[in-house]
Image: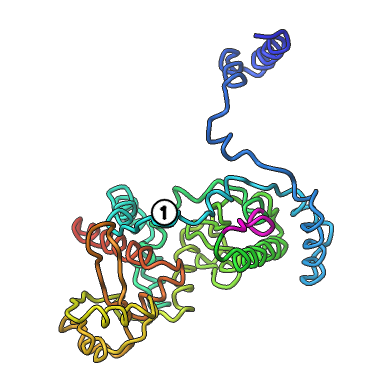
Amino acid sequence: MTLRSTIAAFLIAVYALLAGVPAAFAVQKTLKKPPASAKRQAPGPLYGQRAEAMAFADDLAERRNLDREWVRQAIGQSRLLPSVLRLMQPAPKGTAKNWRVYRSRFVEPVRIRSGQKFWQTNAATLERAEQEYGVPAEMIVGIIGVETIYGQQVGTFRVMDALATLAFDFPSQHPRAAERQAYFRGELEQVLSLSMRNGSDPLDLRGSYAGAMGLPQFMPSSWSKYAVDFDGDGKVDLMNSPADAIGSVANYFKAYGWKSGMPTHYPVQLTGSEADLQELLAPDILPSFSVASFAAKGAQLPIEAQSHAGPLALVELQNGSEPPSYVAGTENFYVITRYNWSSYYAMAVIELGAAVKAAMAGQGK
């Protein structure tokens, strides 16, 4: 131990003694090395040093009629996060998708048990949301469970740091770099406008590496458009109010066209040619085919789907080196993908919600 560290430890011990804290504990806490994760997430320089960022702040303040110095300070005190840039990189080419592996991350005992507890605690609120918005409770439970395990993992990144990093330094090698950078500049603008309206400090917000916040992981623009005060306390709080999170998820689905009573998908058996298969897959997850056109291309649906009036999409879920799985996605399946543009995500939400509902029924709700 150096002379400087010896003196520092002595002073800490004296302070701890005066404060009633065990001196050994105080010294140990001071000398303990930071965890490796802290090194990986070490922040970069302040954006206040970047002329581009400050010009953006000035333009934003003028367009949104916000206090110029407040905006400059909020953006200026944000820092570049190298870890966010690494997390935003696309998967390496040739990486095989695997639905079964993906599913196992979300439809598993911890989330199911947590989902049961969440449903039991918020049963009346979930029922009210279903009545007002037409969105089944299991869908709302599935979303919040996949996103944050019912509030257990809401993110530790400072939202302003994450959004500023992606707004000004989005990875140029990303295939949609320009589009994504513009998107995150819009989200940075939204979070500042939202904070000004709420009278809150944007630098206090914590969330995901992409800037999503709260139990349902709403991006700032979604918070502004779809979040609701469902507990009636006069404010929208997606961080601490399960009721607001439940109502907001239901409102989001309804705004994107959720149809009450419509299934999310049907099983399907494929008997057509490879050309038929490729034609069915061409629109991706956008519902584009009638039941009749599905049948004409060798996609056989069960009896309960024969009377389905809306369009369908053939959804492919790859299973690594094993054959893919297929379902016929409805317009409601497509609505779920507006929350996260992934068919794998949508199926995980559906199946987690169904698993929690089954567990609730099994215990006599």
Residue 241 shown in magenta? no
Where is the C terminus found, in terms of image quarters? bottom left
Q: Which residue is drawn at 47% across and 60% down?
A: 216
**Where does the image place residue 42, in percent across and percent down from the top left?**
63, 38
In the image, is residue 224 above or below residue 240? below
Q: Quadrant of the N terminus?
A: top right
Q: Is residue 273 left or right of residue 124?
A: left
Residue 258 visible in this rendered orientation of the protein:
yes
Can residue 235 be seen here? no
Q: Name the residue under label 1.
A: 150
Q: Give the range drawn in magenta.
A: 165-173
Give residue 189's quadrant in the image.
Answer: bottom right
Q: Callout 1: 10 Å neighbours few (<14), some, many (20+)? A: many
Give residue 185's quadrant in the image: bottom right
Is residue 125 placed above or below 208 in the rendered structure? Answer: below
Along the line of sight, the residue nearer the viewer: 299 or 158:
299
Q: How is the image coloured?
A: rainbow
Q: Which residue is drawn at 19% across and 81% down?
A: 272
How many labels, in total?
1
Q: Name the residue at 58% across, 73% down.
A: 225
| Residue 356 x, y percent position in the rendering | 28, 59
| Figure check: 261 above or below 353 | below
Secondary element type, mark 1: loop
Where residue 243 sits in the image (x, y, percent)?
A: 47, 62
Pick whichever, 246 or 339, lies toward us: 339
Along the viewing direction, whichever of 22 and 192 lies nearer the viewer: 192
Amino acid under disc 1: Tyr
Q: Quadrant of residue 232?
A: bottom right
Q: Where is residue 350 in the image (x, y as percent from the top left)?
A: 32, 66
